[in-house]
Amino acid sequence: MLGMMTSVNLAEKLSTFSEHFKPRTIGQFNGHDLMVVKVKGEFVWHSHQDTDDFFLVLKGRIRIEMRTGAVELGPGELFVVPKGVEHRPVAVEEAHVLLIEPTGTPNTGAAATAAPRVVI
């Protein structure tokens, strides 16, 4: 079975789309989606009541704004927003981010407004 496994090239996956704030699932890990996303501008304020929100910056810079302050992240830096904390990612210039969330977690915190799950 080991011979059938392949690695995932994050830059290659990111090169397949250009939309912002529309995560693409690139794999799964213990019931969680591994996703890449391009961000630019301000995302909507939202929270996740049942799960933390994991952000790892691959390229560029982002700011995770929370009602009580903000965290600045550059390449190779990560931040976990605790469940229930209202937040929004902001990027002045396009940035590339790796996200890890339980499969089915709506990116806006609400299923009605969430980006559809797309596997690449």
Image (cartoon, rainbow, N blue to C red):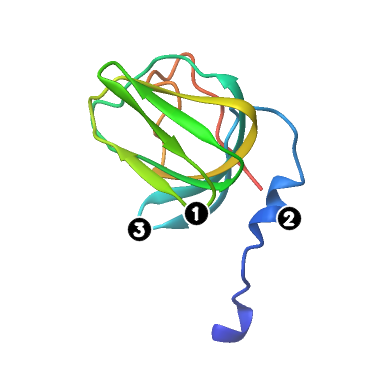
Q: Is residue 69 left or right of residue 15?
A: left
Q: Is residue 42 visible?
A: yes
Q: Nearer the viewer, residue 49 or 59?
A: 59
Q: Are marks 2 and 3 in contact (CB under 8 Å)?
A: no
Write down the residue under mark 3.
30
Q: Which mark is residue 12?
A: 2
- Crowd class of label 1 (few under 14; some 14 to 19; many from 20; radius 10 Å): few
Query: Callout 3: helix, strand or loop?
Result: loop
Q: Is residue 1 visible?
A: no
Q: Dividing the picture into quarters, in which one does residue 60 lie?
A: top right
Tag in front: 2 or 3: 2
Cα distance between the residues tagged 2 and 1? 18 Å
- Crowd class of label 2 (few under 14; some 14 to 19; many from 20; radius 10 Å): few
Tell me which residue sits at (76%, 44%) in the image.
Answer: 16
Q: Which mark is residue 76?
A: 1
Number of numbered markers = 3
Query: Callout 1: helix, strand or loop?
Result: loop
- Name the amino acid, label 2: Glu
Give percent across and percent down for residue 33: 45, 48
Q: Nearer the viewer, residue 1 or 92?
A: 92
